[in-house]
Image: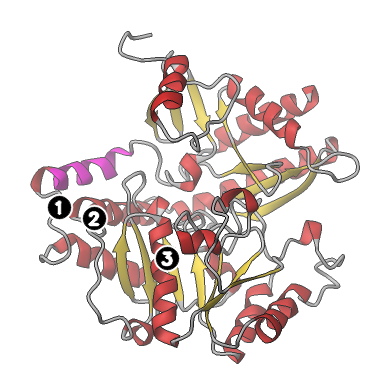
Amino acid sequence: MMSNFLGPGKIIDKKKEFQVPCSYHFYQVPPQIVRGKMQYVYDHNNKEYLDCFAGVSVMNCGHCNEEILDKTIDQMRKLQHMTSIYLTQPVVELAEKLATVTPGDLKRTFFCSTGSEANEGAMLLAKLFTDNHEFIALDLGLHGRTQLTMSATGIGMWRTTATPSGGVHFAPNPYCYRCPFGKTPETCNFACVDAVEKVITRNTSGRVAGMIVEPIQGNGGMITPPTGYFKALKAVLDKYNIPLIVDEIQTGFARTGKMFAIEHFDIVPDVLTVAKALGNGIPIAAYITTDEIATKFTRPSASTLGGNPVSTTAGIAVLDYIKDYDLCENARLRGTQLKDGLLELQKKYPIIGDVRGIGLMVGAELVLEDKAPATLEVDIILEKLKDRGILLGKNGEYRNVLAFQPPLVITVDDITFLIEQLDEVFSEV
């Protein structure tokens, strides 16, 4: 359309020549995305796409949201960076705001720039608080790309080092559709929680610094625990004085119909980590904890760009926008509409093995007749949807789960369009 756009082919050539080869992309015929507007993005030919992945659960308030951009750019013109050794106002204002929206007595915030950094910092904090050094994580969890967070990741494709850090023990995740114990939610009595206790008593030294979990496992395949799971898990951890770190990097900031997904499970974690949607495209992350736990971290520490005036101003604007436009309620309503539509499609198409999630954090696991992962079919469906003007994600251990994580400003008509297009694509596949 315009001469200054390289086009997909030349971008791929430059990626191959100048980027580290671990960087992949979706689609056999990928578009070049050049601009965005709320729940839509546009390619170099000005084709419109309904974005149902939100840059992996980042753009909760929509692409290029004018209200958020105006405040962020205004701050950028005034003061971009001074680092935390100097006093600036936005960082303390955002910390105060976070203390009002996080559950329970979570109050003290440490700012950084990425989710990996937040999880790494939370795990360090747990070590300092307990004076212990081992961790427990769940199968199919994903917590980052640093050495420790990668070592706490339970998906093989994301554990890219052959020498992960020691002292991390894995327990079965609450994957009800493929229960490792062959049970159902009605009959399991939380066998997966019993397994956590066995890991503590059998596989660790008893000196466990913490357990890190996602309330809904995003990259693991939108795996959503049954009601009561986290209460039972927290009771076990409390029995052994093990802090619970809840990773809300994908699930936080209204995505599930509540500000944080853990609120659906009626417990309060000891540490909560956030990133992604807090900046709505501006890099920012944090971990948040209690007064008691925070008191153990007194030696000097800082993140050079963490909590800079621009990112924290964006974070304040995001929290204001979520409240002013009641994105929690829209996520709840549109999530119900989406899930109901997918369940109707499941009646027509046996390839949809399971539909799960909360709010606008929804997954549809695609399977063959023998329940084997329909990995190839997912790629075909993503390609066909892209051609029809819809961008969708995929995740799961075998990349066979359709991932629905749209901007939370998505409308009734958008969801109706999405379900209609899915119906047509499934009929072709």
Instruction: Return the residue found at the far front.
Output: 163
Q: Amino acid at mark 1?
A: His
> What's drawn in magenta, residue-wise?
65-76
- Element type where label 2 sits in the image: loop
Name the residue carrying label 3.
Answer: 120
Q: State left or right for residue 339 relative to residue 326.
A: right
Q: Which mark is residue 413?
A: none
Q: Judge whether residue 167 is colored magenta.
A: no
Q: Pick whichever, 386 or 236, lies toward us.
A: 236
Q: CA distance from mark 3 to mark 2?
A: 16 Å
Instruction: Locate residue 73, reporting x and y percent.
Output: 19, 41
Q: Which mark is residue 305?
A: 2
Which quadrant is the C terminus positioned in?
A: top right
The kind of secondary structure the magenta stretch mainly shows is helix
Instruction: Locate residue 369, reporting x and y percent.
Output: 90, 40
* Residue at the (49%, 62%) spot, across then down: 149
Q: Residue 70's image quarter?
A: top left
- Element type where label 1 sits in the image: loop
Name the residue carrying label 1.
Answer: 81
Q: Amino acid at mark 3?
A: Glu
Instruction: Locate residue 99, reporting x and y percent.
Output: 33, 72
Residue 32 against residue 229 in the figure, above or below: above
* Residue at the (38%, 8%) spot, across then down: 1
Q: Pick whichever, 278 or 411, lies toward us.
A: 278
Instruction: Return the residue found at the far right.
Output: 370
Report if residue 248 is visible in the image. no
For the residues carrying marks 3 and 1, which lies nearer the camera in this image? 3
Q: Earlier in the sequence, mark 1 or mark 2?
A: 1
**Contact (Cβ within 8 Å) of mark 1 with mark 2:** yes
The crowding category of the residue bearing disc 2, from other C-alpha atoms within 10 Å (few below 14, some 14 to 19, many at least 20), is some
